């Protein structure tokens, strides 16, 4: 009997080793660079510093309160690169002209370029990204950079840094040429022309907003289709599982189950991936990081994390960032067909129910101690259609159509962009911030 027991123990031990090896080494092909990147502290790329200070749109000022806006392709935009060259020279050899109260009439008077950020850029981070220290002593935040090329009278480029939080501007004279704007805006029939709220008769808050105007002819634009690469035509757990395997070192060892409120959940000892009913995917990593990366290095880690997600195919830009203790939170939004993609308010409520997840931006990512600990995104890819719609870009008419909002607050922001619609094609909408409310109306 003793020999029989010993034999059974040896047999069971051998069987356990065999089954464990089969479970561990199953689907070895899934253990790729993508997962390794997601679960290990990464060395940041210093070249990403310039992407942190890259504007989310480039405004061309034609003079006489007429502007155009270029979204997207900022990394390859030749005019943006020329502006960046001036900024580099400004930080190195620019002649400081002093600081004064922000005056939009002064900085927008002459034709030039405006590099605009989607958030209040800290001057310390801005100068650090360009390798310049001590610059933050002159200005606290940078919301826009205005560059005015040389003209017949002046042989230098003038640069204004606008701090719209504190309503200050800091000026520099730079001996670096910049191409003059020679385009006549009257010839831009099929492009959107903007006007400055600060130079117009609108009763807005002090901060300037660029408002789209109706061109000579009706503005035609392509609609945008939404494609769900995780679920295809039917939202099935089996279909989603195939696309979340990349987040796990050994997908065969993960658990999958239907969580609370019909949330699809996949997990192992260190990773949890959730797919919510409003098509939001959330990845959480419970490993501990081993380095204090700092702001710019954390941004590089976040940026390269997104690049490793092959199901993110649309262009995105940094829309905001915050720091909370050791956490650096970076928010990104998409650019589609020359306009920003805007999430509807249904994603931004605090009382999310029925298996839905809150999401303020298209991609939200948190880096702690050099490691990505949370990654949340809207899963859609956006495809430009061949069908077109016509937009009525008359802002005053839009405001009349909205009617009385019951508030005496002033408008703080206006944006024209594609608004995500899960059931229909995305179209252009006016997004208006008024007294804490966000109003939207189709263009």
Image: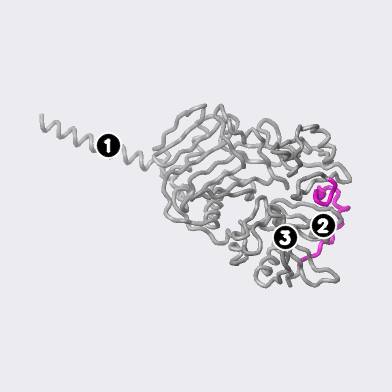
Q: Nearer the viewer, mark 2 or mark 1?
A: 2
Which residue is the site of mark 2? Answer: 105
Q: Quadrant of the N terminus?
A: top left
Q: Nearer the viewer, mark 1 or mark 3?
A: 3
Find residue 52 and name its label. none
Q: Camera-side residue: 420 or 59?
A: 59
Which residue is the site of mark 3? Answer: 169
**What is the crowding at mark 3: few (fewer than 14 residues within 10 Å), some, or many (at least 20)?**
many
- In the rendered picture of this protein, how many numbered marks are placed on residues? 3
Q: Earlier in the sequence, mark 1 or mark 3?
A: 1
Q: Earlier in the sequence, mark 2 or mark 3?
A: 2
Q: Camera-side residue: 101 or 272?
A: 101
- Separation (CA) of disc 2 from disc 3: 12 Å
Query: Residue 409: image x %, image y %?
Result: 75, 39
- Separation (CA) of disc 2 from disc 1: 78 Å
The reply to whether dot 2 and dot 3 touch (C-beta < 8 Å) is: no
Magenta highlight range: 178-201
**Does 12 appear in magenta?**
no
């Amino acid at each position: 009997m003793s020999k029989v027991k010993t034999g059974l123990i040896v047999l069971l031990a051998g069987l356990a080793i065999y089954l464990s090896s089969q479970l561990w080494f199953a689907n070895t092909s899934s253990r790729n660079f993508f997962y390794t990147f997601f679960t290990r502290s990464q060395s940041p790329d210093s070249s990403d510093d310039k992407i942190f200070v890259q504007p989310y749109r480039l405004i061309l000022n034609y003079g006489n309160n007429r502007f155009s806006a270029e979204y997207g392709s900022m990394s390859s935009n030749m005019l943006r690169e020329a502006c960046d060259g001036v900024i580099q020279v400004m930080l190195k050899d620019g002649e400081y002209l002093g600081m004064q109260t922000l005056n939009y009439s002064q900085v927008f008077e002459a034709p030039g370029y405006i590099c605009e950020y989607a958030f209040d850029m800290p001057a310390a981070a801005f100068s650090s990204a360009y390798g310049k220290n001590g610059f933050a002593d002159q200005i606290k935040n940078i919301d826009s950079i205005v560059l005015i090329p040389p003209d017949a009278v002046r042989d230098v480029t003038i640069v204004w840094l606008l701090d719209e939080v504190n309503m200050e501007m800091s000026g520099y004279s730079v001996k670096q040429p910049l191409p003059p704007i020679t385009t006549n805006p009257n010839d831009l029939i099929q492009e959107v022309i903007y006007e400055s709220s600060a130079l117009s008769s609108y009763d807005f808050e002090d901060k300037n907003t660029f408002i789209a105007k109706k061109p000579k002819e009706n503005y035609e634009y392509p609609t945008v289709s939404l494609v769900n690469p995780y679920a295809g035509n039917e939202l099935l757990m089996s279909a989603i599982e195939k696309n979340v395997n990349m987040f796990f070192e050994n997908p065969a060892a993960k658990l999958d189950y239907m969580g609370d409120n019909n949330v699809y959940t996949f997990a192992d000892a260190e990773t949890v991936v959730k797919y919510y009913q409003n098509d939001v995917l959330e990845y959480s990593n419970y490993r501990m990081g081993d380095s204090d990366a700092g702001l710019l290095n954390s941004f590089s880690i976040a940026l390269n994390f997104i690049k490793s997600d092959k199901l993110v195919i649309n262009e995105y830009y940094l829309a905001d960032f915050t720091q909370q203790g050791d956490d650096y939170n970076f928010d990104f939004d998409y650019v589609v067909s020359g306009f920003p993609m805007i999430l509807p308010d249904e994603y931004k409520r605090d009382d999310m129910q029925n298996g839905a997840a809150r999401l303020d931006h298209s991609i939200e990512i948190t880096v702690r101690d050099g490691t990505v600990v949370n990654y949340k995104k809207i899963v859609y890819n956006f495809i430009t259609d061949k069908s077109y719609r016509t937009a009525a870009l008359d802002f005053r008419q839009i405001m009349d159509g909205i009617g009385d909002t019951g508030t005496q607050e002033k408008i703080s922001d206006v944006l024209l962009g594609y608004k995500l619609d899960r059931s229909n094609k995305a179209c252009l909408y006016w997004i208006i911030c008024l007294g804490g409310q966000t109003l939207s109306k189709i263009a």
